[in-house]
Image (cartoon, rainbow, N blue to C red):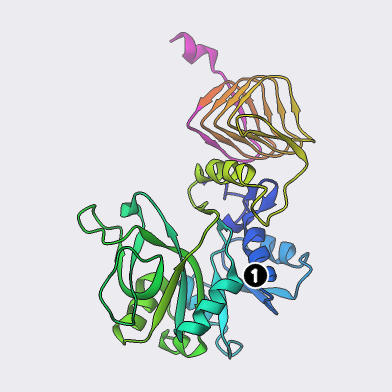
Amino acid sequence: MPLTTNRPKPMVPVLGRPVIDYVKDAMVAAGMSEIVVTTGYQGEQLISHVDSWNTPSRVNQEDSPMGTAGSVKLLSDELTETFVVGSGDSVASFDVADLLDSHRKSGAKVTMALWQVEDPTEFGIVGLSEENQGQIDSTLSEGYITKFKEKPTPEEAFSNLINAGLYIIEPEVMELVPSGEKYDFSKQLFPDVLSRGWPMYAKTVNGIWFDVGHPFELHNAQMALVEKRADLPFPMPDGEVLPDGSFISSEASVSGHISKSIILAGAAVNGAVVNSVIMSNSRVNGVSESSIVGENSIVDSRILNCVIGDGNHIVIDLENERR
């Protein structure tokens, strides 16, 4: 919020493309035969967008929130062979084909993509072993999952590898999910699979990974996409990359100061923009610092550490300024 007032998280734009398109690209590159998007909140936008994809795709709309695993359970009759689940609100350079290969070689029931972080205390961490139900080896970047821990303290952290939100799953695993109940992959299903001794495998991915569930990660994700554009499989919009890593769309107008920022199509800057994202068709006539400005908004003042939704006009209240 407030960027999700008018759209579901998977439709939040990243370099002019909805977040979900980055996940879709990874699936298509791996040769997925069909993509099903499960959704609840503002699903109408997703239905319209998914219809525009050039790959067999559809949306399965939930009547009530079913959780990450519960929503997939609704598709059980169709999931008769190995399938892939990806989070629709992350930007990541997943090599799904490589993960599928590791999954088949390991004989696992579930394979999970992992990402390495410096501070694991805000995430769910994963402990790996060279063999199923073996001892944790913190030096491994791939192996059999031995233990999970949600948001550990620094003393509890046995790993700096976290769940990156992409899974390869065998159909029989979904039999463990109760029908008609809200149920979660990471908090409920996967611990259950592990407790049964079923083999679960995991592999650390390279490239980039950002969970854009936090608005300010939108800035970090887009700056990283620009910086690593030559090494990533994602398309870049037309525009100029400045020496400091900023990006200015070819359809934007800039006559002010830009530093470490993203200026998207149709935006206009006549002031200063620092460590910020200015989305499509917005104008900054003042100063935006460490902020996100949604689409079709106007900033006529100075904002700092703000997230501005779509269609807003931010002005200076001179009366309060004098006070």
Q: Secondary structure at mark 1?
A: helix
| Mark 1: amino acid | Met
Residue 91 visible? The answer is yes
Q: Position of residue 25 (x, y in %)?
A: 68, 64
Q: Residue furthest left?
A: 155
Return the residue nearer the eye: 221 or 182: 221
Q: Looking at the rendering, which quadrant does residue 110 occupy?
A: bottom left
Return the residue nearer the eye: 238 or 181: 238
Q: Residue furthest top?
A: 322
Which residue in the protein does label 1 denote? 27
- Residue lying at 64% horizontally and 54% vertically, measured from the top left: 232
Return the residue nearer the eye: 323 or 20: 20
Q: Position of residue 236 (x, y in %)?
A: 72, 47
Q: Position of residue 86 (x, y in %)?
A: 55, 68
State left or right for residue 239 relative to residue 178. right
Magenta stretch holds residue 97: no
In the depicted structure, whether residue 164 falls above or below residue 61: above
- For mark 1, does the 10 Å Cα neighbourhood hold few (<14), some (14 to 19), or many (20 or more) residues? many
Q: Position of residue 56 (x, y in %)?
A: 75, 76
State left or right for residue 37 relative to residue 182. right
Residue 62 visible? The answer is no
Q: Quadrant of the C terminus?
A: top left
- Residue lying at 64% horizontally and 52% vertically, measured from the top left: 231
In the depicted structure, whether residue 208 falls above or below residue 184: above
- Residue lying at 67% horizontally and 30% vertically, measured from the top left: 242
Magenta stretch holds residue 308: yes
- Residue lying at 50% horizontally and 33% vertically, measured from the top left: 306
Residue bounds of the magenta highlight: 304-323
